[in-house]
Image (spheres, grey):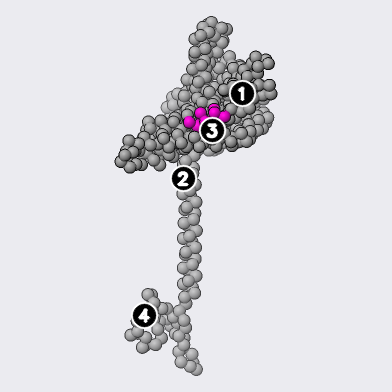
Amino acid sequence: MTIIGSSDPADRDRPRKWSTPIVGVLRTTPDGPPVFLAPDTDGRDRARNAEGRRMSSTGATAHQSTWWHTFYGGLQKMGRSLQLPVAVLPAAGILNRLGQPDIFGADGLGWDKVATAIGAAGGALLNSALGLPLLFCIGVAIGMAKKADGSTALAAVAGFLVYYTVLQAFPEGCKAGAVLKGNQCVDFTADVAENAAFQNPGVLGGILMGLFSAWLWVRFHRVRLVDWLGFFNGRRLVPMITALVGLGFGSLMVWVWKPIGTGLNDFSQWLADLGSGGAGIFGVANRALLLIGMHQLLNTFVWFQFGSFTKPDGQVVNGDINRFLAGDPTAGQFTSGFFPIMMFALPAAAMAIAAAAKPHRRKEIYGLMTSVALTSFVTGVTEPIEYSFAYVAPLLYAVHALLTGASMAITWGLGVHDGFSFSAGLLDYVINWGLATKPWLIIPIGLCFAAVYYVLFRFIIVKFDLKTPGREDDDEVEDVTKA
């Protein structure tokens, strides 16, 4: 039998040495007195250890999960932050296009000075050394800083200007026969002067400076100094600290950017050398990342950082979009294939979704889908269509991502070079017609993809009974209507 306590009755009056009862076993034998067996502490210890290990493992898993959610949330916030500077690009693209010789210039209306002024305005925003990086710096700082205000942007500008000026203070060596004079390389024998080259981290440098500015603002915008320095308390302190960080960051980039920039250029060249394959890979990755809100991270580097082109005035521009707008005939590898999808294929997919709706809801869905289809066709804004089926029918979205990659590969393989300042819609298609190569091919390619999208989407929706708009269960629609 099992007893609690000691086997000696006299021990009942002694102080206990344990905070919990001792559990033991009293075993009786035919030939001798009862024998008290020691408590089974080993089993309890094993149980405690197992429980401890389980709790430790659970804690470690929870810690890893928390870390991942924090990291993932930060990337999503970063992607949203990049949308703010990207929103400025349509204005820059329109100004840059109107300033071209074939519109307001000598080959168009003949307003040379007007064209020069307008083109310079657009070029200022698209400048890959100052304009674009500054826009991204401010946008990232505002987007990443919690409860940001105007002082966040001021701190970002202060830090970036110091960082940029430090880079400009260290020009690279000139070519043989030329002498560095100020910021120019002068060849006295040929009576030629060229702008000296500088380390140019471009948009990446602006993004990093924006992240520094956001962190410094969050960390120091409520700091209070001693009374005699009270004027610099809080928000007034942050621009000063950011300027000092800009000095250090600029000095660091002078020394370390060259190998980093060379590596990025080599990677971009490798991707470009893949030709249609590289364009297709980018198209699939772009649509896949859209689902988790991180496509802007990929777009920023490919469209505004990778590759370089030297304009006739000696200015170097980076990124597929910037190179296209600057007149680079080899640009457009990572933009051309979006036009057939956004202008033709996705509107056709919207019509397929409406056609597959239940009869009593078909008219309603046709009205909704016609609206978002026109938005996609005219402006290139596709999220209303894509989000209508991305999460309720992941199979459709997988097909869409693969077909986007196919469109990117086909257009590039056929020699189509087109680009945009905002998105691949009708507006950018018309505005940039004069800069594009074989833009007319986009129409037949787009019509072919429209037919493929319509047939595939309608077949898959009906075959697998996917709950796209208009095919939801009636009770679900009723619940949503009541809510």
Amino acid type for the residue under numbered disc 4: Arg
Single out the residue that lies furthest toward the bottom: 31
Q: Which residue is mark 1?
A: 180
Marks 2 and 3 close (CB-CB < 8 Å): no
Q: Main secondary structure of the magenta part?
A: helix
Mark 1 or mark 4: name the one nearer the start of the chain: 4
Q: Which residue is mark 4?
A: 16
Could you tell me how far apart the alpha carbons at marks 1 and 2 are, in whole angstroms? 49 Å
Disc on res. 143 = none
What residue appears at the point 51 percent right and 36 percent down from the top-left corner? Answer: 249
- Magenta span contains residue 444: no
Mark 2 or mark 3: name the one nearer the start of the chain: 2
Task: Tell me the SS state at disc 4.
Answer: loop
Mark 2 or mark 4: name the one nearer the start of the chain: 4
Mark 4 or mark 3: name the one nearer the start of the chain: 4
Query: Can you tell which of label 1 and label 2 is closer to the viewer?
Result: 1
- Which one is in front, 323 or 397? 323
Could you tell me how far apart the alpha carbons at marks 2 and 3 are, in whole angstroms? 22 Å
What residue appears at the point 47 percent right and 37 percent down from the top-left corner? Answer: 245
Query: Can you tell which of label 4 and label 3 is closer to the viewer?
Result: 3
Could you tell me how far apart the alpha carbons at marks 3 and 1 are, in whole angstroms? 28 Å
Task: Tell me the SS state at disc 2.
Answer: helix
Amino acid type for the residue under numbered disc 2: Thr
What residue appears at the point 49 percent right and 73 percent down from the top-left corner? Answer: 43
Mark 1 or mark 2: name the one nearer the start of the chain: 2
Provide residue 460's location: percent of width, then percent of height.
Answer: 56, 34
Mark 3 or mark 1: name the one nearer the start of the chain: 1
Callout 3 environment at 10 Å: few (<14), some (14 to 19), or many (20+)?
some
- Which one is in front, 205 or 110? 205
Q: Which residue is mark 2?
A: 70
| Region rendered in magenta | 162-170
Amino acid type for the residue under numbered disc 3: Leu
